[in-house]
Image: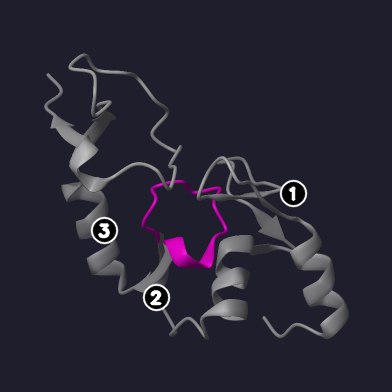
Amino acid sequence: MKLTEDTKHAFLQLVVEKSSTACWSWAGEHDADFRPLFRGEKAYRVMYELRVGDVPPDFHVHHKCENSACVNPRHLVALWPEAHRAVQTKKPVFKHVAENNRRYRRRPIARCTSSMSISAWVPVVLS
């Protein structure tokens, strides 16, 4: 999607950067699966093209944060469809464990904060 300066400004007005989370929220329209939309395009795909570069043809934009409503370009990566499916089918289900607490603390899977370290994530096997 080619964006004019006015369109870029309108797009960036709908991005909400919160200090409490590393994910950037979308204040605009969403589809039925709560994926952000901007003028008929996925907003995270528009953000990727705006901040990172063109998405190669037939590639998917993957959310490293696992939050499909996030538009933070640092959380987005372009993947070949087979690689994207492999990432989605092989990823374990995680629950956050507080580093100073042995009990599991339930947190939404779409929430991520910059204060969480990778060592704080523990895989959980679902039965």
> Badges 1 and 3: C-beta atoms under 8 Å apart?
no
Q: Residue furthest top?
A: 103
Q: Tell me if residue 53 comes above or below residue 115 in the rendering.
A: below
- Asked whether, in this view, residue 75 is left or right of residue 127, the answer is right
Q: Are marks 3 and 2 in contact (CB under 8 Å)?
A: no
Magenta range: 63-75
Q: Quadrant of the rendered structure where residue 115 is?
A: top left
User: Residue lying farthest front?
Assistant: 100
- List x then y, in percent, for residue 118: 23, 47
Q: Is residue 83 left or right of residue 37?
A: left
**Residue under numbered circle 3:** 85
Which amino acid does the dot numbered 2 rest on? Phe
Badge 3 element:
helix
Q: Is residue 57 magenta?
A: no
Which residue, given by chain and number where applicable, does mark 2 sit on? Answer: 59
Q: Which residue is mark 1?
A: 29
Dot 2: element: loop
**Camera-side residue of 67 and 116:** 116
Q: CA distance from mark 1 to mark 3?
A: 26 Å
Q: Is residue 73 magenta?
A: yes
Q: Residue at x 74, y 47 (%)?
A: 27
